[in-house]
Image (cartoon, coloured by chain):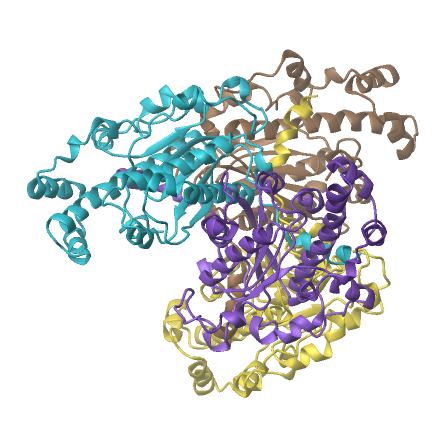
Chain colours: A brown, B yellow, C cyan, D purple
Amino acid sequence: MAMSKFEYVKQFERDDSCLPNCWIVVRIDGRSFSKFSAAHQFIKPNDAAALELMNRAAITVMEDFREIVLAFGQSDEYSFVFRKDTQLFKRRASKLMSNVNSLFTSSYVFHWPRIMGNKELRYPPSFDARVVLYPTDKNLRDYLSWRQADVHVNNLYNTCFWNLVLKRQMTSAQAGEKLKGTLSSHKNELLFQEFGINYNDEPASFRKDDIIGDRFWKENHEVIGLKSLATYQRLTATNNSTSNTVPTPIHYINNISPSSKGNQLNSIRDDSHTEGNRVLNREIMQCNPTNSEQLHNK
Amino acid sequence: MAMSKFEYVKQFERDDSCLPNCWIVVRIDGRSFSKFSAAHQFIKPNDAAALELMNRAAITVMEDFREIVLAFGQSDEYSFVFRKDTQLFKRRASKLMSNVNSLFTSSYVFHWPRIMGNKELRYPPSFDARVVLYPTDKNLRDYLSWRQADVHVNNLYNTCFWNLVLKRQMTSAQAGEKLKGTLSSHKNELLFQEFGINYNDEPASFRKDDIIGDRFWKENHEVIGLKSLATYQRLTATNNSTSNTVPTPIHYINNISPSSKGNQLNSIRDDSHTEGNRVLNREIMQCNPTNSEQLHNK
Amino acid sequence: MAMSKFEYVKQFERDDSCLPNCWIVVRIDGRSFSKFSAAHQFIKPNDAAALELMNRAAITVMEDFREIVLAFGQSDEYSFVFRKDTQLFKRRASKLMSNVNSLFTSSYVFHWPRIMGNKELRYPPSFDARVVLYPTDKNLRDYLSWRQADVHVNNLYNTCFWNLVLKRQMTSAQAGEKLKGTLSSHKNELLFQEFGINYNDEPASFRKDDIIGDRFWKENHEVIGLKSLATYQRLTATNNSTSNTVPTPIHYINNISPSSKGNQLNSIRDDSHTEGNRVLNREIMQCNPTNSEQLHNK
Amino acid sequence: MAMSKFEYVKQFERDDSCLPNCWIVVRIDGRSFSKFSAAHQFIKPNDAAALELMNRAAITVMEDFREIVLAFGQSDEYSFVFRKDTQLFKRRASKLMSNVNSLFTSSYVFHWPRIMGNKELRYPPSFDARVVLYPTDKNLRDYLSWRQADVHVNNLYNTCFWNLVLKRQMTSAQAGEKLKGTLSSHKNELLFQEFGINYNDEPASFRKDDIIGDRFWKENHEVIGLKSLATYQRLTATNNSTSNTVPTPIHYINNISPSSKGNQLNSIRDDSHTEGNRVLNREIMQCNPTNSEQLHNK
């Protein structure tokens, strides 16, 4: 009785369902992770364990939400791509975004002790989330390429930055000042001249995850169901050679067979054998807490 | 260079800032908490520790987001009310919702070991979130009253349900069948006749949190800045006596002095002395995992 | 001074810009046109002059808004398709919709005296409008096919209805009752048996405007810039033969040469010579005022 | 059959219903009216007949849509305020906006011959439209005050501008240059010094429509149902005396009695006797076509 008197307030909720036939991307992003990584003494520029924890959290999300066809992570962010025709939560943006984000966060804290060893979690970390829609396959590929290019930009910067700080005893301000306005070529030169590092000699394992080039999409076309990429323009040779050197993006792909199309989410399947397929490349990913906010313009 | 080629994809993000001069409510809600509470053997109908954990997570959120003026929880859900004029995250719905939800989730897992004792967390729990706008103070009060009335409906049901299951050895199906279609009066009668329980004799501590009545708002009007409640209609005597018996809603209020109005969020203040004021009533809240979905119509 | 005190109210306007890279369809629809057509004694089932007036209004809109690549009309409605990459009014839905709708309405009243002859306009007619986004070419084609199929369904119904009313002296209620629940085959049979009309013998001019089939899109692919229709599935032979009989949809195409792509809107061009190309098929369109609302389920 | 195959495209329409319990303002605005008023040789700065035509169109809208409680016009724009609790068109923004705008446009063209006399309408004019929501009475009053202050700013400018052009034979560019950056006080001085015009001596009829001050709202509080204006701050004396001199805003009020609350729209009522009440002040409104775009920053 009292209930019905107040129930009208439900009408203030708005329908935020996503436009049909668009790729739905949920991107999550660490909140104040510069502070968080400093407080937990993450190794610079890349902390293998911390990245493993990010990946572990992403895998948990993908195991739960089978409608996610691809996940791509770098640093303190992760992008999850839902299939175009997903009907999960009636495509409501809030539901998709908050469920993915909450489970990712929960898993990050849950798996901390096992992956981070004796390092104690000092306070609860958090992530924000957003939903972005992409109408075409090309738009989606460009989105992923944008995130991968961001990996490269950030990692090159961070490699320089932390070499300057750790080996030249510069302050953060000094290192930042030295790198201000430099181009990629300058940074490559700096690494080679001052530290004897050939950035193109990064381990082969770092180069596997090129999702800008065509090869990745050709090899995985059945899995993610991106059907018509014929119109996609190949990147120039220069770009390709550059992107080959990009280290440490991580992606995961949900192995959705054509016959499972239209199935209910969370269908119970024996994944023990397919794990190897689903998680294609599980490599170390770079971590760039210090300058992520300035570079990402978040 | 490669960056700029792909950067156009940022334009696909939509502006989702909330209409100015409206109350912003973020409500979070446990996902599959029936299963979660069963898996972790929560005491029925109310598990004091599990509720304490919910409250601890809510307090963490309020300590971080000072623009939240009120939080109200029940069972596996929590509502957070941002001040009408908050400019936090430029009022972007996604940012507000995801940050609150993620920090809540993170804190829930983070504090589990301390509060839940030896009970091991078996898998990462998660919560969804939504944003709802309320243009007037009356709409906001009615929203909170709606949630409180929901507490009463659920708790009365659960008290009956679990007494039937635990003391009469009924199955869930049998207990559900017996309660199907019963009114509140029937349930009160059932508790009295079959179990000797007078539902109105619940401990006084359970009755403190009446946010439907006027008294709460009069006593706290400066704190939350709800200025003009003159038009609000008092509930009937019948409703009031009913609502007095509602157990275990929990609310917290951020102690925002008038002079702090317009301050930046997260201003550093010495909160050690005000904790007692800010957290007004910290009581046990009911937990109704088994029927929450059917009753909430989530 | 007084101005600045109140100017904050501008912040309550919401950004309603359309998602990039989607087709933008503005559909307008006569308000209470059953009453309007009765008040102005439109000939049933199709009033050539009234339809000419609709077309004249649509042409005015297309001459003004050169970013519209296609318009398709039937009865008292018209759909206008903006190119996917239009930046007109920054893609703001309100601006696009209201400008098209207002100019259409204005032109309808403006041209009434010339086209409708001595028939006096008794009161101002009006149209509503909406914006719908379609991510892919296939979605857009299906939208247009949906409208064309609607033409067929309505026109067949109306041809039966008005023959019953005008030649059998039935009341509207009686004619409606007789047609209730009948299939297309029933209606074809009724026309043939009772009135000697072979619906498939409609004049060839009525069959030109088939926008469901592939031919239309092949012949006009440069004009409207729909590039990749390879995945489109041909309709079955049955459907094709049916759609051939559909009378009187009208479409117009803005003759946008590839070189003009990316040009500013409203570029001044000498249209006197291209009129013949731009307005491909200018035929009589059916008008079904009496049952439009019930059929359209508006 | 073919119909059902395509009908899925309806799902791409989005729900755009307005947040409950907010004032809904539809503002329409002439498109390229500088050009339109020049092409039709409107008298400067104010063309009585052209303004009468605007008002006639607004009255048509209000007679049709009884849920509009107030309309306020100036120059080539008009604002229509729907009651907070209107359920018209299920509060869908597109429907409300397009219907109001289309009927206004239609009526403008329809009534042109009668009101504009021998002056021929050379081409169809059009208006755009937008919807803005205001949560509180104060926000709505401030919106209307904003529009009224705009009247004053524009009219003072135009009075100066056209006196310079018509009496000093300046070009538009010269007059604009002379007025560039001048304050209100400068413009008042200019009118007095150069043309002997005391702007404060405008006819009393021009001063009747002060909707910034409290008096208007007190006198009309029953009519429009704005209940709680107690918190509204009176303008300063300076502002009041200024606003008293504002000429020629026009407003209309729909006389909605309390008992009619909740009635269907378009209920048939005998309005012949209430016309005098409903249209309170029907005065000449200023017209400022030449600089409207620059001032409104449209």
| Residue C271 spot, x, y in % from top left | 47, 23
Which image quarter: residue A119?
top right
| Residue A296 placement (x, y as % from top left) | 73, 35
Viewer-nearest residue: B159 or A93 = A93
Q: Pick out the residue farthest to the top.
A: A237
**Residue C119 appears at what percent x and percent y?**
32, 47
Residue at position x 59%, y 77% from top?
Answer: B247
**Residue appearing at x 29%, y 37% in the figure:** C285
Residue A152 vertical placement versus A130 (above, below): above
Query: Is residue D180 in view from this perspective?
Result: no
Total tally of numbered discs in the picture: 0
Pick whichever, B63 or A282, lies toward us: B63
Along the line of sight, the residue nearer the viewer: C19 or C57: C57
Q: Quadrant of the N terminus of chain C?
A: bottom right
Q: Position of residue A88 (x, y in %)?
A: 47, 46
Residue B263's image quarter?
A: bottom right
Q: Is residue B237 above or below residue D76?
A: below
Name the residue furthest left: C193
Q: In this rendering, does residue D290 appear at all? A: yes
In the rendered view, tell whether residue A64 sits above or below residue B244.
Answer: above
The residue sitting at 18% across, 51% down in the picture is: C181
